[in-house]
Every structure is written in structure tokens, then in C-alpha cells.
Amino acid sequence: MTTPFHTLYTGRLWSIMSWDQLTAFWGRIEPEGWYLYAVGEEVPAAPATPDQTAEFVRRVDALLRDNHRHDYCSIVYADDLERPGFVKIYDPDNLGVSCGFSTNPPLPGWIMSRVPPEDLDAGRQPPEGRRRWWRSLFGASAG
């Protein structure tokens, strides 16, 4: 059976191409009702608080800009750029082939979803530095 999360995860997503577009995109994220999932960590059972979502957006934006030193973004994808309900964010340190065709594309680093997420790969753990980054957002109980 296909779930709402699977449909969104495998469905058509739109790339945010420029850093200016990313800045505008974050401004359209209403902070209520988002599940924040670091792929490889424990799947969240409940949505994050609005404050947690706002802090995640602020910190992931800084991480992307610091670690993806290009004049373009192209590592954030959403189901709808104006009214997002599902966002894939690729880790700049684990890109592989995140766009185009690949029989084994990399998993995103983080997912923001309005529907409950599902475990994408129980065997994969993010690098310890990313795990510390994630825990610093949500405390020792995350993951």
C-alpha cells in the first residue's frame, strides 16, 4: 500500500535554484505542523513545535550556505514552492547525484513533512558531526 509520505517522497518536487529563492522560500514556511526528520535518526512521532521548526529552518539555512559554497542552491526540493507541505533537503557533505537520473540516488539529509514520515533507511546513520548538530537542535532525546 502506498502511503501519503511515500507518494510525496517519490513524487515530483521542484528545486530551489538560487540562494535568493531559498531565502524567499523559507519565508513561506508556516512553522506549525511540520515533522522534522533527520534521515538515519529516529522517525519523529509528532510534529515539531513552531519554535523548533523556526530554529531548524534558521540553522539548516546557515549550514547549507556554509557547506555548499556555490553561487547556486539546488539542494532543497519541495512539492510546492509557494505553499510547501513536503521538503527534501540534501546534505552538502553527502550529495552524490541528487538531481538527474541515478539508480541509487543519495538519501536526503533532512525532510520536512506535513504528514508523518517513514523510516527511509534504518541501517544508515549520519556522520557523528551531523548527529551532534541534530541533537543540539532537539536535545539528547533526538535519535
Image (tube, rainbow, N blue to C red):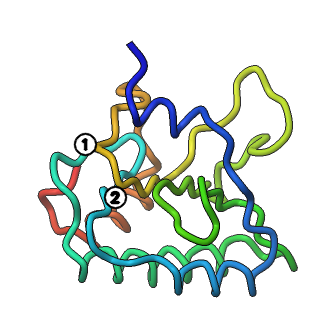
Q: Which residue is mark 1?
A: 42
N-terminal of the pair, mark 1 or mark 2, is 2
Q: Whole-percent x and y of residue 115?
A: 33, 47
Q: Of 86 and 73, which appears nearest the observer?
A: 86
Relative to 46, does residue 125 appear above or below in the rendering? above
- At mark 1, the secondary structure is loop
Relative to 129, does residue 12 appear above or below in the rendering? above
The quadrant holding residue 131 is bottom left
The quadrant holding residue 15 is bottom right
User: Measuring 51% from the left and 39% from the top, which residue is drawn there?
Assistant: 8
User: Measuring 72% from the left and 55% from the top, which residue is drawn there?
Assistant: 14
User: Measuring 35% from the left and 55% from the top, which residue is drawn there?
Assistant: 114
User: Measuring 84% from the left and 31% from the top, which residue is drawn there?
Assistant: 101
Relative to 86, does residue 106 appear above or below in the rendering? above
Q: Which residue is mark 2?
A: 36
Crowding around mark 1 (Cα neighbors within 10 Å: few <14, some 14 to 19, many 20+) is: some
In contact (CB < 8 Å): disc 1 and disc 2: no
- Picture quarter with the N terminus: top left
Relative to 20, does residue 115 appear above or below in the rendering? above
Q: Nearer the viewer, mark 1 or mark 2?
A: 2
Q: Whole-percent x and y of residue 94?
A: 65, 49
Q: Whole-percent x and y of residue 13?
A: 67, 48
Q: Amino acid at mark 1?
A: Glu
Q: Amino acid at mark 2?
A: Leu
- At mark 2, the secondary structure is strand
